[in-house]
Image (spheres, rainbow, N blue to C red):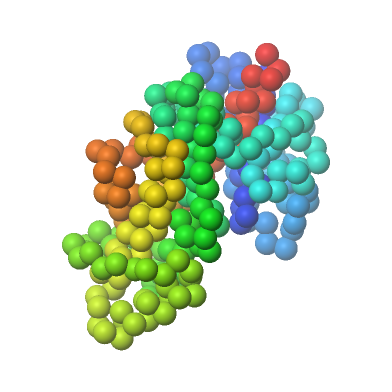
């Protein structure tokens, strides 16, 4: 039996198809990521889903159920059901780390902390409340200000041992702070670390509202930023932040797993 999950994010559409007939745990059949561009809503979901099916060699009638999540989950008109990002993320994380109790989800436009019961069910959450605070777009905007790619930005921060406070909560004002640091000849690696430390501090403050219990897992696109991972670990004062293999697809995977459970 095949089931699918679709995560309609603010910038991308993620699709995961799983095979529930595999021996042992369900296995990931196919993942697919699409940048919608000029395609919106259900049209983007349709295209992403059809592309994933084609890559997996499946037809729509071979998939028993499709669950959707994300900011645009209500636009997926062919979905069997929809679930919150917190429920989807908690379930998806449990596939990789069954012992996870704290999930930190940092995407392009929003971040959240989720507390789980240790069995893949979300029991509490907190989200970012200020402009760009605790989100990947903040780091992206600052990397552009430094004329660096996001990858270069993250790697550069690891070469710094300075602690420079950044007080701005808004991207516009933070850019002014970065410009001031550039004009004062502050090395780029120190600025990069200051930005990522600031994002990590805001994320940590958010997660503390639900409590930080081991194991801590980070999901979302910021998993690929090593500087942020290090900053988050330091800010949360934990020995390890676990990283899943397919961080952008965890919520879509959680949807597919929940869809399978609903059909059992």
* Residue drawn at the location 29% of the way across and 63% of the way down: 193
Tell me if residue 250 can be seen.
no
- Give how far across and how far down residue 77 sits, in percent: 81, 41
* Residue drawn at the location 74% of the way across and 32% of the way down: 81
Q: Where is 45 relative to 129, above or below? A: above
- Give how far across and how far down residue 74 sits, in percent: 75, 43
Q: Where is 74 relative to 135, above or below? A: above
Question: What is the number of callouts on the image?
Answer: 0
Nearer to me, 223 or 195: 195
Q: Is residue 50 toward the left or the right of residue 187 in the image?
A: right
Q: Residue furthest left?
A: 161
Nearer to me, 64 or 216: 216
- Give how far across and how far down residue 186 sits, in percent: 25, 78
Q: Is residue 33 toward the left or the right of residue 39 in the image?
A: left
Quadrant of the image for the N terminus? Answer: top right
Tell me if residue 190 can be seen.
yes
Quadrant of the image for the C terminus? Answer: top right
* Residue drawn at the location 50% of the way across and 14% of the way down: 24
Nearer to me, 197 or 160: 197
Q: Residue furthest bottom?
A: 183
Q: Where is 264 relative to 48, above or below? A: above
């Amino acid at each position: 039996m095949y089931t699918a999950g679709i995560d309609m994010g603010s910038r991308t559409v993620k699709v995961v198809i799983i095979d529930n007939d595999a021996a042992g745990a369900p296995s990931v059949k196919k993942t697919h990521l699409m940048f919608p561009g000029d395609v919106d809503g259900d049209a983007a979901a349709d295209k992403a889903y059809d592309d994933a099916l084609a890559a997996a060699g499946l037809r729509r009638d071979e998939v028993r159920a499709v669950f959707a999540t994300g900011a645009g989950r209500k636009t997926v008109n062919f979905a069997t059901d929809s679930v919150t990002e917190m429920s989807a993320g908690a379930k998806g994380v449990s596939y990789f780390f069954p012992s996870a109790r704290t999930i930190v989800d940092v995407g392009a436009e929003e971040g959240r902390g989720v507390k789980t019961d240790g069995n893949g069910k979300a029991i509490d959450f907190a989200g970012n409340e200020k402009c760009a605070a605790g989100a990947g777009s903040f780091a992206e905007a600052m990397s552009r200000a430094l004329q660096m790619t996001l990858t270069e930005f993250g790697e550069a921060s690891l070469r710094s041992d300075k602690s420079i406070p950044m007080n701005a909560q808004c991207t516009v004002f933070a850019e002014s702070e970065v410009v001031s640091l550039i004009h004062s000849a502050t090395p780029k690696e120190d600025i990069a670390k200051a930005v990522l430390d600031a994002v990590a501090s805001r994320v940590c403050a958010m997660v503390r509202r639900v409590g930080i219990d081991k194991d801590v897992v980070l999901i979302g696109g910021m998993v690929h930023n090593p500087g942020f991972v290090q900053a988050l670990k330091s800010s949360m004062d934990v020995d390890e932040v676990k990283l899943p293999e397919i961080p952008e697809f965890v919520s879509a995977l959680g949807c597919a797993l929940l869809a399978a459970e609903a059909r059992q």
